[in-house]
Amino acid sequence: MSTTITHFINGVETAGHGDRHQPVYNPATGQVTGELRLADRTDIDAVVAAAKAASAGWAETSLTKRTAVLFRFRELLAANVQELARVVTREHGKVVSDAAGEVGRGLEVVEYACGAPQSLKGGYSDAVSTGIDVFSFRQPLGVVAGITPFNFPVMVPLWMAPVAIVTGNTFILKPSERDPSASLFLARLWKDAGLPDGVFNVLQGDKEAVDGLLTHPDVDGVSFVGSTPIARHVHETATRHGKRVQALGGAKNHAVVMPDADLDLAAEHITAAAFGSAGQRCMAISVAVAVGSAAENLVARLKERAEAVKVANGMEPDADMGPVITPNARSRLQKIVGEAQEDGAALIVDGRELVVKGHEDGFFVGPTVLDHVRREMTAYREEIFGPVLAVLRVDSMEEALEVINSNPYGNGTAIFTASGAYARAFTRGVRVGMVGINVPLPVPVAWHSFGGWNESLFGDHHIYGPDGVHFYTRGKVVTQRWPEPTQLSGASFAFPSS
Ligand code: NAD
């Protein structure tokens, strides 16, 4: 059965004015499950007007009351993890346990936001000059938009909204067109938590909705997470229109395996990090860089483990991996793997033609491992965003570092080693924003911030954690004097030094 997926504007689910719409699929069955409304100009103006109208009142709501809403939202989210996970799996395809994991990581950011009274605490300098004190504090930007990708329809919106809202902003979420239903589930939870209408809104749509928000004079800030070309477009356009912008882009994440590493541990974790969520994670390991003698034994172990991955409908409790998001994503991947093979890569595990019984119309593809990949191959240069692991062989850690540091992306990376000295040299020398030591997916916990370097992030702020608080607020510094009437004297014409 196909349902209409609407906007959520000023506390109300509404079909809006736009006459365009597009189908939403269950990638495991290939069937249409929803009809998504796509915003037009009137809808964009309506959602921004609602967020702007709610802005002053919400910013003036005491921090204690704002935080109380966050605590209630936290409880509701925690009570709905499983149901929300199933909503995600139906439209994204990832296995339910992984979807529940993404809700859990979002929940962590909500919990961080519950601590806003601590993170918003300002600074005070007593008596910096005779009778003069200075204090600084932070105030909200106003109306902020969050534009999010398909691969984490709950976690990525929750990287943004809780921090934006608790710091006093109103928020417009523009979710991915591919799996939009989770955004409405979140909107209902916010409402049930007592958030005033207009503080959290959802605008469904495509480029028209995004560009409308980026150029709208009443939008003050934009957080974006998605692919690098769109991140660049968002950063350039919104900056040109005077907004504060953070735009997180794509990735090509390398895991370096040193000869001294525990190869079973490395292969186990790299397999999970390469094929979990069908490789559709911005922190997925897509390149294993095998150093020296590690290569042969590592590849043998990766083959064994990749072949053991159970690919199935993500709703099945024992599934390891579900489908990819669209038939296009699958055919692009199949083409890139074929070209790599023609160019001399060794196809160790070939998942291209996998068919899942009973799900012949699903968008499935199996884990694929390519060995002897070279840097000039498309399979290395492009973000495939599917279950394909490329193995590159190098002679030393220095060469591994050179490979990673020449790559245009810089989101995450990992090293597997038993040596603290290797780990330290790697961590300090690698030009990547998030580094794991024997940890393949080093997604920072919520009280640190998340962000890549190079073409994986445009803007000055990482997302959530302390950087998130800074991004969604502006600093204000006050210099005050409260003179006794007897102390009133003429102002000095020189720069004060008392
Ligand atoms: P995408 O860039 O296609 O879409 C992201 C958002 O941009 C969506 O809301 C979409 O509607 C909008 N959009 C798409 N095309 C647009 C256009 N031409 N103009 C304006 N807006 C447009 O990304 P995706 O396919 O949904 O997600 C996968 C990508 O996101 C991968 O590249 C992945 O690495 C990246 N990602 C990065 C991070 C990170 O933290 N750096 C996290 C998750 C995903």
Image (spheres, rainbow, N blue to C red):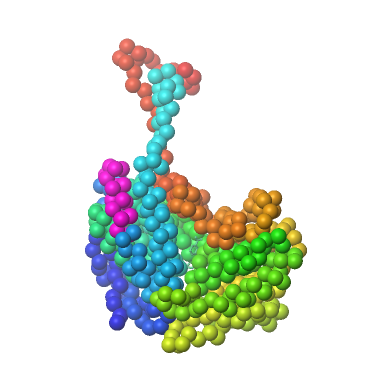
Q: Position of residue 264 (x, y in %)?
A: 63, 67
Residue 324 appearing in the image: no
138 over 394 or under it: above or below: above
Horizontal side of 184 relative to 432 (left or right) equals left
Q: Count numbered badges in the picture.
A: 0
Q: Position of residue 406 (x, y in %)?
A: 67, 60
44 over 353 or under it: above or below: above
Residue at 64 percent of width and 59 percent of height: 415
User: Residue 66 colored magenta?
Assistant: yes
Name the magenta segment's main secondary structure: helix
Q: Depth check: give the residue in front, 393 or 343.
A: 393
Horizontal side of 490 relative to 300 (left or right) equals left
Judged from this view, the residue extending furthest toward the top is 486
Residue at 45 percent of width and 46 percent of height: 466
Residue at 56 percent of width and 64 percent of height: 251
Residue at 56 percent of width and 55 percent of height: 434
User: Residue 457 colored magenta?
Assistant: no
Q: Depth check: give the residue in front, 173 or 323.
A: 323
Q: Quadrant of residue 38?
A: bottom left
Q: Quadrant of the N terminus?
A: bottom left
366 over 134 or under it: above or below: below
Residue 396 appearing in the image: yes
Q: Position of residue 344 (x, y in %)?
A: 71, 79
Q: Quadrant of residue 453?
A: bottom right
Residues rendered magenta in the picture:
61-77
Q: Position of residue 306 (x, y in %)?
A: 58, 75
337 over 128 or under it: above or below: below
